[in-house]
Amino acid sequence: MSAWTSPAAIEVESRLFRALAVLRVVVLVNAIGLTIYRAANFDPPVAALVCALVMIGWTAFVLWAYAAPSRRTAVLVGADLAIALGLLLVTPLVKGPGFHASVPGFWVSGALLACAIHYRWIGGLLAGVALAAVDLGLRQEIDQSIYGNAFLLVIGGPVVGYMCESVQRMALERDEAQRAAARAEERARLARAVHDGVLQVLALVQRRGGELGGDAAELGRLAGEQERELRSLIRGEQPGRGSSRGPAHGMADLAADLAALETGSVTVSGPAATVEMPAHPAEEIVAATRAALDNVRRHVGEDARAWVLLQAFPDRVEISVRDEGPGIPDGRIAEAERDGRLGIAGSIRGRIEDLGGKAELITGATGTEWELTVPRTGVDG
């Protein structure tokens, strides 16, 4: 189904044809009145009656025909234009070669606008050129008024056709936006349900399985893999992630940026929704988190398990980076700073404190955990 045959485009076209029906009645009354007033100019006079009946009969027919989208075919639109051209062509025969006003007059605008509505600016241009060429070709003398009428036909058709096309495109974009909003709302609802239920259960199974060991450890590993896959699926379906609508200019999605750090040994957990922050603080937070993960790989092992948890609050974000290594011995950090190795002091604490936040280190025999807290307000690039 093409864009022009979609329900939204057809509805716009139907509304325009209903408006055109009113215009056709108005120009018909005008044309019949002028035909009666100028009946003496017809030779024979009965020709005026025949032309009036043709316009009345055809107007009544097209009002019915254009009312149904299924009847708006090329044959109908072509016949509509042909009748208008035919009434122009018989004008010299029934009024003489020196006529001043054509038989249909402004009545031909109905066929012109029908072509413009149905075939947009191309149809309006072709119909306008055809009507103007026939009208001018029949004239013995072309004055300013006649030229002006022909010029209006030529530019009026494509202008109206372009406007019709624009309205149809707007209707299509509106419907697509409404569908996208409905899909996003449903995905967000499902993501919240999954995040609050399934993901937490999988994370619990993974943690408890690792603690119990044996077959339970394998079960925990499988639960961890399923959790990562499910989180990736949710992130890919969130509005602004994997779609054309992202964070505002100068902003970043911290949840998506942290999710990019996830690997086979690193699990990243966060809100189901987008977490927007200014781009610079978000980059610094991600860099600090990456530095903490680098420490895990360097001091615990390349395949060491690590967990990153993002929590978003109205006034702050909290990021936890945890591993299950042997912990950091007392005095090791101070010794590293004296030796000029500033990984913790600069890459982690320095970045977070520069943002007005705080970085706390909790370490022991059961592992090491960094807790990074950064305010969401009063922080910019």
Image (cartoon, rainbow, N blue to C red):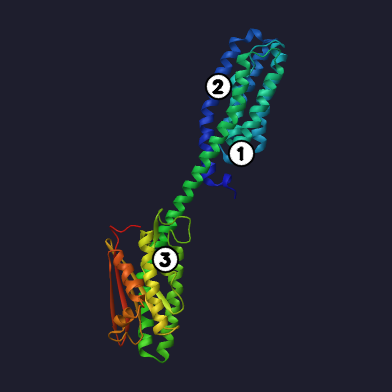
**Callout 1: SS:** helix
- Residue 151 drawn at (x, y percent): 61, 23
What is the crowding at mark 1: few (fewer than 14 residues within 10 Å), some, or many (at least 20)?
Answer: some
Kindly indicate the quadrant of the structure image that contains residue 49.
Answer: top right
Snapshot quadrant of residue 213: bottom left
- Residue 194 visible? The answer is no
Q: Which label is found at residue 71?
A: 1
Frontmost residue, 109 versus 167: 167
**Mark 2, secondary structure of its residue:** helix
Q: Is residue 323 above or below residue 287?
A: below
Could you tell me if residue 207 is visible in this image?
yes
The alpha-carbon separation of the residues under discs 3 and 2 comes to 64 Å
- In the displayed structure, 381 sits above or below 157; it is below
Residue type indicated by callout 3: Asp
Q: Are marks 1 and 3 in contact (CB under 8 Å)?
A: no
Q: Amino acid at mark 1?
A: Arg
Task: Give the percent coordinates (x, y) of residue 40.
Answer: 64, 7
Check residue 257 in the rendering and tell me which mark sits there, or answer none.
Answer: 3
Which callout, 2 or 1, points at the residue further toward the start of the chain? Answer: 2
Residue of label 2: 27
List x then y, in percent, for residue 158: 59, 32
**Residue 304, numbered label:** none
Three-letter code for the amino acid on which mark 2 is drawn: Val
